[in-house]
Image (tube, coloured by chain):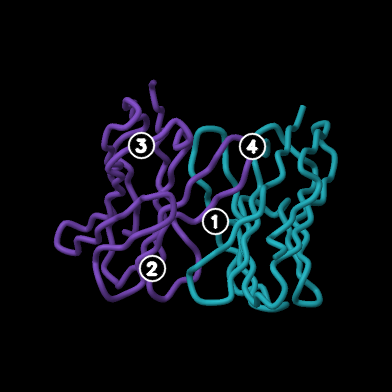
């Protein structure tokens, strides 16, 4: 079965601390991987994507993620967070042969001063 | 440049009413998607168009949900006889290349 799991529903961190948001997926076909951010009452904004090539991808706002095929993971990281990073983060997977994206449940990132 | 737009941004309906939600995709994007996002959840796929053809409607929860894109551009998601469980944010996304989808701000539907 094809599924996406975000292991943490909430992640509180202090400002300027590093953060990692975890995402795992299950698939028997090739995948395309995305992280989106959602601010309150807004749509989804693409942070970064992995389609092919280098497994370490860099995105906007200082975020990066690494595709690990053997562990079927695509964790999101940022070395130093800011108050403005407070938002909901969604991992999304496109499975080869299907056009739709399958989303994880989301991780709420809360930055404490 | 213009992104994906949706209207209305907020809709309140009484149970049993019909509603229509509009999506204007990015110009030139051939693919268009509708997702439903319940409170505190991730978006869930509803349906997919390539130009005017509806190629996948496997996510539509019941026959009360209907989507169309008659000219391959603007799309409308219609919900007939709304129920309380239909309350959610409805997100539209468009895509030029496979899988990279650009989302609109969503329509928040509240059914009383």
Element under disc 4: loop
Name the subunit of mark 1.
B
* Gap between marks 3 and 4 measured at Cα: 22 Å
Colour seen for chain A: purple
- Whether pointer 3 and pointer 4 mark residues with C-beta atoms closer than 8 Å, the reply is no
The residue tagged 2 is A95
Tag on residue B45?
1
The residue tagged 3 is A81
Disc 4 versus disc 2: nearer the observer: 4
Name the subunit of mark 4.
A
- Whether pointer 3 and pointer 1 mark residues with C-beta atoms closer than 8 Å, the reply is no
* Gap between marks 3 and 2 measured at Cα: 31 Å
Q: Considering the image in quadrants, where does the C terminus of chain A appear?
A: top left
**Residue B67 screen position, x and y as percent:** 73, 62
Q: Are marks 3 and 4 on the same chain?
A: yes
Q: Are marks 3 and 1 on the same chain?
A: no
Crowding near the residue tagged with mark 2, few <14, some 14–19, many ≥20 C-alpha atoms within 10 Å: many
Is B42 on the left-hand or right-hand side of B76? left
- Residue B51 vertical placement versus B39 (above, below): below
Specify the chain shown as cyan.
Answer: B
Element under disc 3: loop
Q: Residue furthest top?
A: A113
* Gap between marks 3 and 1 measured at Cα: 31 Å
Element under disc 2: strand
- Ranked by sequence position, the earlier of labels 4 and 2 is 4
* Gap between marks 4 and 1 measured at Cα: 19 Å
Q: Considering the image in quadrants, where does the N terminus of chain A appear?
A: bottom left
**Residue A106 screen position, x and y as percent:** 42, 40
Tag on residue A41?
4
Is A32 on the left-hand or right-hand side of B76? left
């Amino acid at each position: 079965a094809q599924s996406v799991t975000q292991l943490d529903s909430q992640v509180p961190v202090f400002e300027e601390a590093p953060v990692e948001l975890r995402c795992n997926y299950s698939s028997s076909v090739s995948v395309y991987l995305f992280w989106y951010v959602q601010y309150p009452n807004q749509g989804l904004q693409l942070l970064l994507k992995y389609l092919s090539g280098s497994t370490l991808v860099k995105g906007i706002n200082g975020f990066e993620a690494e595709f690990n095929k053997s562990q079927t993971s695509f964790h999101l990281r940022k070395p130093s967070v800011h108050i403005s990073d407070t938002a909901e983060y969604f991992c999304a997977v496109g499975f080869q042969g299907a056009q739709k994206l399958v989303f994880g449940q989301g991780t709420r990132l809360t930055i404490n001063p | 440049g213009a992104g994906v737009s949706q209207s209305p941004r907020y809709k309140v309906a009484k149970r049993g009413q019909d509603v229509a939600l509009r999506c204007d995709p990015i110009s030139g994007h051939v693919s268009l998607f509708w997702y439903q996002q319940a409170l505190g959840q991730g978006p869930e796929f509803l349906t997919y168009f390539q130009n005017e053809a509806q190629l996948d409607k496997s996510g539509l929860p019941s026959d009360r949900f209907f989507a169309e894109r008659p000219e391959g551009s603007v799309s409308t998601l219609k919900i007939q006889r709304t129920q309380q469980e239909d309350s959610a944010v409805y997100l539209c996304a468009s895509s030029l290349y496979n899988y990279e989808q650009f989302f609109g701000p969503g329509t928040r539907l509240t059914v009383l």
